[in-house]
Amino acid sequence: MRLPWRPLSGADWAAVCVLSGGSALALLSLLPEGSPLHVPQFAVGLAGKYLAYAILAVAVDLVWGFAGILTLGHAAFFALGGYAMGMYLMREIGTRGVYGNPNLPDFMVFLSWDHLPWYWYGFSHLPFALLMALLAPGALAGCFGWLAFRSRVSGVYLSIITQALTYALMLAFFRNDMGFGGNNGLTDFKDVAGANLHQPGTRAALLALTALALAFCLLASRAILGSRFGALLVAVRDAESRTRFIGYRPEHIKLLVWVYSALIAGVGGAFYVIQVGIINPGEFAPGNSIEAVIWVAVGGRGTLWGPVLGALLVNLGKTLFTGLLPELWLYALGLLFILTTLFLPRGVAGLWRAAKPAGAAEVTPEMTSADHEAVP
Amino acid sequence: MGKEGRCSFLKKRTKKLLFLRSRAVARVSDRRRGALLFFKKEVLALLFLLFISPCHAEDPALAGLRAPDYDSVAATVTDLAAHRHPRARAIITALRDGTLYAPDEGPGLYILGPAGTTDAATGAPVSGLDPDSLSKVQQNNRVRIAVAGALALLDLSAPDAATRREAAEAMVAHPDSGLLPALTTALAQETDPPAHAAMVLARAAALLSSGASGQSQQAQLDAVAALRGEGNQQARAILLGIPNPPPAVRDAARSAIAAIDLQLRLWSVGQGVFYGASLGSVLLIAALGLAITFGVMGVINMAHGELMMIGAYVTWLVQGATTAAWPGQAGLGLALSVPAAFLACGALGIAIERGLIRFLYGRPLETLLATWGLSLVLQQAVRSLFGPTNVSVITPAFMSGAVKLGGIEITLNRLVIIVFAAVVMLALTALLRLTPLGLQMRAVTQNRRMAALMGIRTPRVDALTFGLGSGVAGLAGVAISQIDNVSPNLGQGYIIDSFMVVVFGGVGNLWGTLAGALSLGIANKILEPLAGAVLAKIIVLVLIILFIQRRPRGLFPLRGRAVES
Amino acid sequence: MSNDTPMISRRGFGQLSLAAAAAAAAVTPALAAEKGEPIKIGILHSLSGTMAISETTLKDVMLMLIAEQNKKGGVLGRPLEAVVVDPASNWPLFAEKARELLSVDKVAAVFGCWTSVSRKSVLPVFEELNGILFYPVQYEGQECSRNVFYTGAAPNQQAIPAVDYLLSADGGSATRFVLAGTDYVYPRTTNQILQAYLGTKGIKPADIMVNYTPFGQSDWQGIVSQIKAFGSAGKKTAVVSTVNGDANVPFYKELGNQGIKSTDIPVMAFSVGEEELAGIDTKPLVGQLAAWNYFESIKTPANKAFIKQWHAFTKKPKRTTNDPMEAHYIGFNMWVQAVQKAGTIDHDTVIDTLIGIKQPNLTGGVATMLPNHHITKPVYIGEIQDNGQFNVVWKTPDLVPGKAWSPYVAETRNLIGDWRKPIDCGNYDTVAKRCVGTKHG
């Protein structure tokens, strides 16, 4: 029997919370400074950053939690999206750079480049940049995934070559000859679509937009996972060989979710860069990808709301502890990883479920059977 | 003028003259020899005055060493050797070794040797000097070149043939036309063939250096031929630098350079292979431990790099302790740190396995996360304990420098690491193949349940296997402490490369790891001169990614039922 | 590490709740401090990650300077309080932490950053929130912000004198140069300036080899042998190294092993100080060169006292001092003087007052804060000794005023920075007589 409506799922609730929370913060930040409910600008920037990270966490969870592919290179897609947005923001500076050069970004001027490289063309237009923020990660994920899934690279091997991918990109973007600003990356942005980035109004709007994007990702993913495709995805995760024998092509299913996830990560990166104000090759560092996986693990993989919660919690903790315990916070972070994997294999979401009465539909976020047998 | 006044006047005058003279010597050309003669005469006259005057006379030949400018010091050193000053060798050696001191005020030079203080000019022991009133005679690179040249000149007539040869070789490095007469004389008397050959080269180099004007064309052509025969970079440099050569000499030099270049290019292939093998051996030793924990056990140990880092710190601690007990025995410390690092990291590995990893068997991807967390903790722990800065691990003398093998330069520390990696590799293979523990390890890897049914205590074997892998990581730390910095960040630089090697070579196969390490090392070193260091690394990574697509289980995949899923 | 000094109150749990509240958006941060309350000084140096190796020392020296100042009664009758945060060698985190220091902790001044990218990352934050940053490390120049005081060397205070020395007779009259660097903006810009400068000295482009390596390069075999081959062209060759941080140790080890002696091919380094040498056995490196504005081995009473104080503070009698530490010493004392002169910690007033403040260097001479927010510095060339210290073999006769913009780069030839009225601009074109681009600040 098909109901005309369905009950709200965790993802729906998460979308509602994110959207209302984000907009509320954004609105409150616009109150005058003396008001008791005023939210400082600092918090708005932080919240925007956390939400952008949450988008990345959702992307990681889609492939890890639902398709069983442990990615150690998703920060690459995130950073590519970020670079696309950063390039737009650089062009938007126009003649307001240090050298007042209308044609070249500052870093090219002082390294004596005489013309704009071809791949920077078009980035003066926001729609083009937004398109590239999707296309660049999508295309990379498409190529990489097509090669990898077709030849049935899986499990640990796949994790390690995703790591190689992001590492190679990091080295490449570090090169000044690439024309992406080298180690310094892109920074000193002035405004976006004509609105000054340093204005509280712009910040609030960006925060609200990020919340909207995250909510949209959650709902879209919820819809996809609730469809037949979502069922197939879980089938591939839990029994890839059986799915293949039934007649499906697991590599196509994996490729689709992989590219979709990269697109989401790219969106996250774009929103991240606007609000953080800098993008540089450090974002490609393998450690960043692993951290994103940790957010998902802490929040609880295999649910859509878990990663959002995990990203917010871990990053809030990081902000607090790098200020409060500058010498000890790495212990805290390291122990968090260890304790989560040891005692909370399903993350915070697992705790929630354990508290709930049994009977809720459970997915088993375990390894694919192939990996299970390969390693004792 | 009183006695004091006269003394000081004489001294000042002598000093001034010496200074002017040293300037002149430094820029001497034949035309100015006359002027020098005048200086010499006046110096002699003043010397005479000094000797007859009743004030303490200082050997004027040495005064230049106290001059504030390095020009005079260098010129004085050259003079001392050229005029065979009786104390030349002692004084110049002391200057080189930093034991030559001058008082802050007044004349005199002293050598502060281990046996006590002596007067540099006479060699007589001196006592009652306040060490705080002395300061070291400083050198700069210019003085160092002069010192090397002066010692070579003195050694050219040494009784030992090897010393004479070394002296001649040193003269090739810094050719000086002023040495020509001395070389010609020495060459005429030389009977030892290697020393003779070296002197021929040194003479050729001096003959072609700037300042050696008026040489016959034939002499120059002979020199070019001699250098062409030598065929190394030094010879090439001299040939390229001939000042205003006549056409015939220029042509001969050109063809000699072309010949040398060809020879060097051929040798550079061999040199590239050595560099590749040496990088490969570093990758190998870094990856071997991982090949056991990851390849054999299936545990993704992201803290592997940190175990290497701890191995390097153990080396530092052990070396510190041994050099404190037996000063100067850096090699002993290094040798002792091999078992120490193995045991320390092995024990730590067993603790990690018992405390953390055994709860995560069957969930390899979660092990990855947990060990990543562990790596952060270990890094920060070392940072808190030993500080964030580099610590200094001393390279023992037998591992410093290089030996020449034809045109290939083999750096000794790299050679030792190649040998060390090979030994560790062989020992591991033997352990896995020949010992009961190895048999048990392989059994548990291949079929855990059956192994358990056969009575093997699988938890114990797991712990020991992980301990073994960690111990080997510690050994890698010992090796890496010799070529890289020892800091809390050490491990991070190697972890990704190690994983690449293991995956590329084929998981679960030590020989695959060896092949992977060597091919990655050599590929890197072939690409590096062509594409630059950064691009080479990127290209290698992309090649690995593509290779894994072709062969998802690496170069040498394990075959058998266990891996087919 | 010695963070347990009792006189420095670390950020208490008041701020814990404050920061948490700020992040959770509930409470407005406290308004301006009252009289007698501590003045907060932000310390923005990485204590973990790749840069911890260099930056932790600077955090320690700041704690020492603040403790010393508190013993003297603080500033304006108020004690100083250090607010230490860890940006963890993560550049976006630098920007976030800078914002936290300025808007949550309301610090009076920030001492921090090491790498160029961290400075670039925090720069927009300081300009937006009108903060004060003291940046203590030698850098590539081409920047002049109203909110930053550059107490490290600009290229004309390190690179140009160093190359002059190599060109001189004492430096070996080099006529062929290898410019080896890590691939990031400081070496790139410095090498670009040096190439232009060497061109004016008659060095042909064919006699200059430029080589870039990635961060943390550990295998130098190939590059060192390339340098050796380049040096075998019959001309005196010298290496100018802008290789950064950690990569220096394996680089120097390889130089030693391949037998490159300072008498054959001298290597002049801009990023190798006492701290880096502490990790190497320096015997094979004796005679290799470094250019800095401070060396630990310079024997002046002020420097001796500073080193003694440092050893007492860290309780480690062998801990080295280095150039960026002196830069913080100068910067901190200048800030104290400016605040005392202005009688307030108001940022605008202090920024204006700082120009013209004089502070004696540890090694002699007096540093003056110039209108372009750079300072005057002596330049020393030191040779590495076998004990890990440097012996000064040359120094500039006078103090060199720092230039923000290089006259050797076409685009910046006519630019100057002058933050006094009437120019009041960091990038003022002296030919067009106008402020180029957006006025910083």
Image (cartoon, helix red, strand yellow):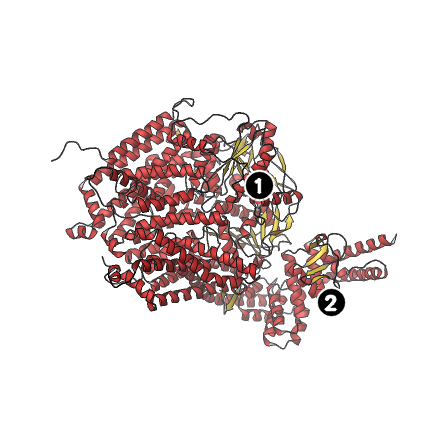
The chain containing the residue under callout 1 comes to: C
As shown in the figure, which amino acid type bears the numbered disc 1?
Ala
| Residue pointed to by mark 2 | B86
Query: Can you see residue A119?
Result: yes
Q: Secondary structure at mark 1?
A: helix
Query: Can you see residue B269?
Result: no
Residue B448: percent from left, percent from top: 26, 59
Mark 2 neighbour density, 10 Å: few (under 14) some (14–19) many (20 or more): few
Residue C13: percent from left, percent from top: 45, 33
Q: Quadrant of residue C371?
A: top right
The chain containing the residue under callout 2 comes to: B
Mark 1 neighbour density, 10 Å: few (under 14) some (14–19) many (20 or more): many
Q: Secondary structure at mark 2?
A: loop
As shown in the figure, which amino acid type bears the numbered disc 2?
Pro
Nearest the eye: B465 or A256: B465
| Residue pointed to by mark 1 | C327
